[in-house]
Each structure stands twice: as C-alpha cells, then as structure tokens.
Image (spheres, rainbow, N blue to C red):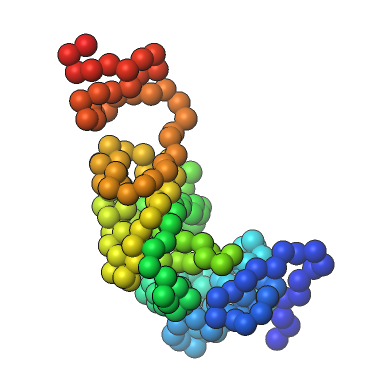
Amino acid sequence: MRKPVLSRGEDKVITPGLPHQNNLQQVGYKLLSMLSFKGRKAEEVSRVLVFACLWNDSVESKSKGYNVSPQTVRNYVEEQGTEVIEKLLESMRRISMEILKGVKEVDISIDWTTKTWYGKPVEGLGSSAKGNSWNYATAITKYQNMVLLLAFVPQVNGMSKDEIVKFLMEQIVGMGLKVGLVTLDAGFYTVEVLKFISQFKFVIGVPVGDVKIYEEFDGEYTTNSKRHKKEE
C-alpha cells in the first residue's frame, strides 16, 4: 500500500509518546495505532479518516486509495465513531498525565469547537443554519512546548455552557491538578460561567457587537456609555 509523502517545507509537530520530532506522516501512523474500529474494513476506514484529516482532504478522495467506499466509512463512523473517539481522547489524556507527573498546578485553555458537514444528519449530533454539526469542548495545557489534552466533552448537545465548563474542570481536578489561570473563548461568555470561574484567575473573550443586559451582576451593570447601580 502506497504511503502518503510529505512535500518539502511542510510543518513538523511533536507527538507525545514518540521520542523525536515527527512529520505529519509519522503522526498519522501514531494515530492509527490508537484507533479501535472493529470489523473487516476497520483498518481501511481508520486510514481514510486519519489521512483525510491530516491532509485536509475529503473522505471521498482518500477512500479511493484504500479500497473502501465512502459510504462504508460513514457507516463505521455512525455505528462506532463516538466510542472510538472517546477511547482515543482518553488515551491522549493518559499520555498527558504521564508527561505531567510531578506537576501540581497548570494553566488551562477551554475551547468549544464546531465541525459542520453537509451530508445526511447523524442521530445525536446537532445542526446549524449551515448544515449538520458536531460540537465538542476540550481543556488543554501547554507544557515544555507541548500542547496536552487534559479534559474533554465529546458531544455538548443539551448541555449549558456552565455545565460544560464545570464538567471539564472536574476532570482536571480529578487528575490531582490545581488550576491556575483559565482562558476561555467568547463562546463561553455567559453570566453563569462568569460566576463559576470567578473562583479562579481567568481570561475570557468578549463577543463583538452591541452590549446588552441579560442579568445584573454584583449589583452593578455596564452599558456602552457608563456604569450604573441598581437604583439608577
């Protein structure tokens, strides 16, 4: 089977668990060893998914090189995808724990990611005006120039923003780590999230646009013009 070849000048990345610097092809083979699809076409499906992601290509395009139909790939993902992804993320989290052995406190970044596709909907996943979407959240830290996964919510449908943040933080605390600084993107900008993370040092993105008052906070609120108290 022909292996993908990197073109000159492509970026290299560091993969936890491997002793040296690796190119994208080596990262791909590391990921393949961590996927756990089952079935007659499991290996081919895994290769299509991994290399389509790494080379920013489509399932339709990559499946031609691995003797498997795009629909077979989709069937495997629909039937086993959630379980496989959770196992993969848990494996990555164990690697992070091993690397952070002896570390007591970490600064973390919490992110919400939406992936949209235009095929048929998948039960349990969300949708948006642009198509069907898979929404997930992660908490990561940076240590010795490596980005390490600490916590994840593989599917956030039906969860409020503060529930997501609390669930991620519980996973990190459960690893025996103390959280220093928390950085969140603007998607988490809600009063309930602010109330929860106020116990930590935090940085949160503010959505761009008009400032509107949804709920008073600590007896004061802010408009575009000046600060007001309740009685004003």
Q: Position of residue 92 (x, y in %)?
A: 46, 74
Q: Is residue 31 above or below residue 109?
A: below
Residue positioned 52% across, 65% down in the render: 143
Can you say which quadrant of the picture contains the N terminus?
A: bottom right
- Which quadrant holds residue 226? top left
Residue 229 seen: yes
Q: How many numbered dots are placed on residues in this image?
A: 0
Residue drawn at x 27%, y 37% as measured from the top left? 191
Tell me: residue 1, above or below residue 126: below
| Rendered view: 206 above or below 88 | above
Q: Nearer the viewer, residue 214 or 136?
A: 214
Tell me which corner region of the image, top left, top right, bottom left or bottom right, holds residue 51: bottom right
Image spot of residue 232 (x, y percent): 21, 11
Residue 128 in the image, given as x and y percentages of width and height: 42, 45
Q: Residue at x 35, y 58 (%)?
A: 179
Q: Which of the 4 image quarters holds residue 38? A: bottom left
Q: Position of residue 150 (x, y in %)?
A: 41, 66
Is 146 or 79 nearer to us in this picture?
Answer: 146
Residue at x 33% of width, y 22% of height: 222
Could one spot residue 125 in this view of the protein? Answer: no
The residue at the far top in this view is: 232
